[in-house]
Image (spheres, rainbow, N blue to C red):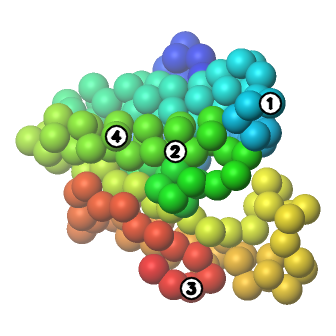
Amino acid sequence: ANVANYDDCEAMVADAVSKWGRVDVLINNAGILRDKSFGKMETSDWDSVVAVHLTGSGNCSRAVWNQMREQNYGRILMTTSTSGIYGNFGQANYGAAKLGVVGLMNTLCIEGAKYGININCISPTAATRMTEDIMTPDMLEQLDPKYVTPAAVFLVSKDAPNHCVMFAGAGSY
């Protein structure tokens, strides 16, 4: 499905509900990169990255929101990035979208608190298809995504905090 398309997100949620009866946890982790310096970036590069990261996180969250409200329980994890928090050359689109996800979390935390919906962000540093050509094999091994997983699991657990941004990578949190 395309997370930038709300109808696709609703269909994913409907499929999950038909198979398992409800949705308790959503992890917004869809992502793409279109790296270019800001002066050379085309509008399509900006739009596609913002659509997937920020609009996609909003679409998926909105698709589960009312069900989580009705069941008085839900956990949503947004994926942010140090590129949004600190900046990174060639990633104005990505950084803006990823910090926008933090802003989305900030508001959803307020709106979801009385319904038992906790929202957090994780800022992972991990080896992915997006990083495989910019790191050495040793670095990629040390940044295995399995070292981020415990933080993600905690942030969507029954005892998860609400309104937390956690950095995670290489076994450090």
Q: Relative to residue 65, is residue 58 drawn left or right?
A: right
The residue lying at 67 percent from left, 27 percent from top is 46
* Secondary element at tag 2: helix
Q: CA distance from mark 1 to mark 4?
A: 27 Å
Which x, y percent locates residue 29? 58, 47
Crowd class of label 2 (few under 14; some 14 to 19; many from 20; radius 10 Å): many
Which of the image's four quarters has the C terminus?
A: bottom left
In front: label 1 or label 4: 1
Q: Amino acid at mark 2?
A: Lys
Q: Position of residue 149 (x, y in %)?
A: 55, 71
Of marks 4 and 2, which one's residue comes earlier in the chain? 2
Judge whether 46 appears above or below 83 on screen. Answer: above
Q: Residues within 10 Å of mark 1 (few under 14, many from 20)?
A: few
Please tell me the numbered disc located at residue 171.
Answer: 3
Pick the residue in front: 20 or 54: 54
Kindly report the distance in space between the C-alpha atoms of the residues bearing marks 3 and 1.
36 Å
Residue 40's tag is: 1
First in residue order: circle 3 vs circle 1: 1
- Judge whether residue 17 can be spotted in this image: no
At x 73% / y 46%, what residue is drawn? 90
Residue found at the very far front of the displayed protein: 39
Identify residue type, mark 4: Gly
Measuring from the top left, give residue 31's x and y in whole percent: 67, 42
- Quick check: marks 3 and 2 in contact, CB under 8 Å? no
The amino acid on which the numbered mark 1 sits, given as a three-letter code, is Lys
Position of 51 relative to 81 (above/below): above
Label 4: which residue? 103
For this view, does 17 lie left or right of residue 1? left
Structural distance between the alpha carbons of marks 4 and 3:
26 Å
Precedes in sequence: disc 3 or disc 2:
2
Q: Which mark is residue 98?
A: 2
